[in-house]
Amino acid sequence: MNTSNSHDLVLVVDDSPETLGMLNDALEQAGMTTLVALEGRQALNIARKMTPDVILLDAVMPNMDGFETCENLKRDLELKNIPVIFMTGLADTDNIVKGFSAGGVDYVTKPINPLELIARIRVHLNNARATRSAQAALDSTGQNLCAVNKRGELCWATPQVNHYLDKISPGGWETLHLESHFAQWLKHNPPEGGQLQVDAAGTTLKWVLVGTASNNEFLLRLISDEQPEESGLLKNHFGVTQREAEVLLWVARGKTNREIAQILELSPRTVNKHLEQLFKKIGVENRTSAATLAVSVLQKGRI
């Protein structure tokens, strides 16, 4: 069954007209629309104008090769989330690793099997759509979240984060030079709930590590020095103890009792006792209702 969307736009980058022709025919038969580029700089210009859904990128090309082209794509905030599949005759481990390090999500070796390639494209298109849907959901809830990689480079951010950073420094993320702070902090494997404070543009930015995604992105929540601690918001609103507020905060973040116990260095039994008291104090019967109330309070108290 053809599961491709007729609006799927694939940019094929290869210096071989024969390869471009073969792939164009195969992709069109699969119901996809293709754009073609013969070299890296042309590919970057096309991508900035048309924003393809996926890019097929030859690794070996004159002037700017595929690896450098991919690195340039990943430095562009508007293009960095487009999945890049390398096409290469270089099947040795070093070049495969180089492709992934440059930001590729997959690779196929030449000569290319069109059916295999189309199957891989569909997988990555579905993954990219799922990621965009998740980010759109976060955007719509007003979350102050972003994700960075191990080098501290921004992978994505919700509009709330971008708006706040632009407010304190024109140019936002680009002018604040936060990468080195994040990279150094993440080297030490901070636990979930760990915090990093960065003084930038006359403001103290506090970042809380929410978790690590499967694609090695670190999810962070931004708290400015203008707002109270999240546990403090819950404590004041519900009239609970500080420890109860901390437990409620992690319940709102979807953690189990065992995970909360590890984060707060308590026993699961103690966490359960705190929850029993919390339910009585805030007038709910289960953790789902408690989490819903807590999220509502937190969203009103954020930036």
Image (cartoon, rainbow, N blue to C red):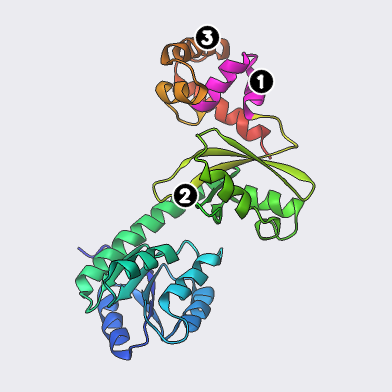
Image check: 287 left or right of 140? Answer: left
Q: Which residue is mark 3?
A: 277
- Identify residue type, mark 3: Gln
Q: Quadrant of the C terminus?
A: top right
Taking the image as drawn, is residue 4 in sight? no
- SS of the residue at dot 1? helix
The residue carrying pointer 2 sits among few (fewer than 14), some (14 to 19) or many (20 or more) residues within 10 Å by Cα, namely some
Residue span colored magenta: 230-250
83 in the magenta segment: no
- SS of the residue at dot 2? loop
Image check: 119 left or right of 86? Answer: left
Q: Residue 286, image x and y in percent?
A: 44, 17
Tell me the number on the disc at residue 237: 1
Tell me the number on the disc at residue 107: none
Establish if 277 lies above or below 261: above
245 in the magenta segment: yes
Q: Which residue is mark 2?
A: 217
The residue carrying pointer 1 sits among few (fewer than 14), some (14 to 19) or many (20 or more) residues within 10 Å by Cα, namely some
Sequence-wise, which precedes: disc 1 or disc 3? 1
Q: Residue 164, image x and y in percent?
A: 70, 49
Q: Looking at the rendering, which quadrant does residue 198 occupy?
A: top right
- Identify residue type, mark 2: Glu
Residue under the image location 43 percent in, 80 percent down: 65
Residue under the image location 63 percent in, 29 percent down: 230
